[in-house]
Image (cartoon, grey):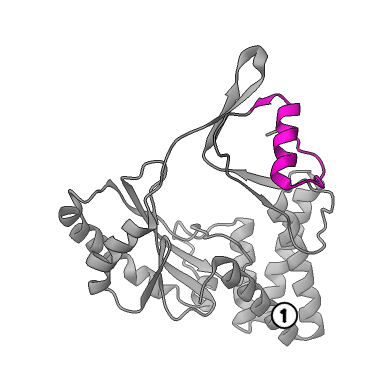
Amino acid sequence: MPNLGRRSNLHPYVGIRRRLIQQGFHPVKVLLKLSAHVPDGPTRHTHRPLEFQFQCFNYWSSGSQGLLLKMENFSRMKNAYIKHLVTKYVDPHFTGYNLQGFIYFCEPIEYVLRGYCFDSGRNADLLKLMTFVQPLYTPCDFIALTLGETIVETFISKDNEEKLMPEIVKKMKDFEPYLFELATPRELTHLPRQTKYENNSDVACERRAYSRILNGEYEEARIELNILIGRLNDHVVAKIAARYEFEALDRAEELIRLLDINSQLALDKLDEYTAFTKSHLRLP
């Protein structure tokens, strides 16, 4: 990825295009869809460059011409077709769910978002269906599939949907108990250690710490937060920390400070994180 340097005062897309050309990228005459994320508020890593998500393209070395930026023409399954499949085949067998875009989730929503995610990757006829469970009190602006798995991956169209959808609905029903089992922060604190979803990652440690605060297990939460802070500081010292590590470190240190003052302040902060995630995911 090229070094795009400091934020341009120009329109961000104009600045991006100019810097790409300066560094040897060759634009093509198609629409390039870019999105830039600028973290809100002060962060520990104040001089971090903008992080860009480049969608729908590949780039590769092209000899003396440097790097060639080429768009790929791939479409995704349309939301209208997903809505058709859900309305006709899924809704009659499920209650208490809502479809929003490509996610089909349980309601009501409090601290945990649970449901199914429809994706098609690069092929509009490919249906990839995944279960997911996402703690909303870990601030995030995208659907996280860490606690989930792919249950269906098949090609589907109006020619074969009547044959495929009953089996797909059956698989969804088979996995529904898993979604019900992880409905609250308490279940997300005490995931069975033998499951493949539980591990010793920083993300899992952060999830357990926050869940313990919501459960009123404040001393245990302090222990988890101190473990997390130590690990994240190790990443910083080793210069292997990225955006997540810096932001998670800021959050953990703030929650420790709030717990030392008043546990209600820490609870309020997690409610603030939950509202942030719901807002960015456009949840009701």
Q: Position of residue 240 (x, y in %)?
A: 74, 44
The amino acid sitting under disc 1 is Ala
Which residue appears farthest toward the top when viewing the image?
Answer: 64
**Which residue is label 1 attached to?**
266
Vertical comparison of 59 with 66: above or below: below
Vertical comparison of 166 with 52: above or below: below
Q: Position of residue 269 (x, y in %)?
A: 71, 78
Residue in the image at 50% along x and 57% along y: 146
Viewed as shown, does residue 273 lie left or right of 99? right
Is residue 24 rendered magenta in the image?
yes
> Closer to the camera, 272 or 187?
272
> Closer to the camera, 272 or 202?
272
Q: Position of residue 176 (x, y in %)?
A: 33, 69
Which residue appears farthest toward the left when viewing the image?
Answer: 163
Residue in the image at 54% along x and 32% along y: 58
Q: Secondary structure at mark 1?
A: helix
Is residue 102 rendered magenta in the image?
no
- Quadrant (top left/top right/bottom left/bottom right) for the N terminus: top right
Viewed as shown, does residue 281 lie left or right of 9? left
Vertical comparison of 248 with 97: above or below: above
Which residue appears farthest toward the front when viewing the image?
Answer: 29
Q: Position of residue 163 (x, y in %)?
A: 15, 54
Please tell me how many numbered marks the rendered image carries. 1
Give the crowd class for mark 1: few <14, some 14-19, many >=20 residues within 10 Å.
many
**Part of the protein shown in magenta:** 3-26
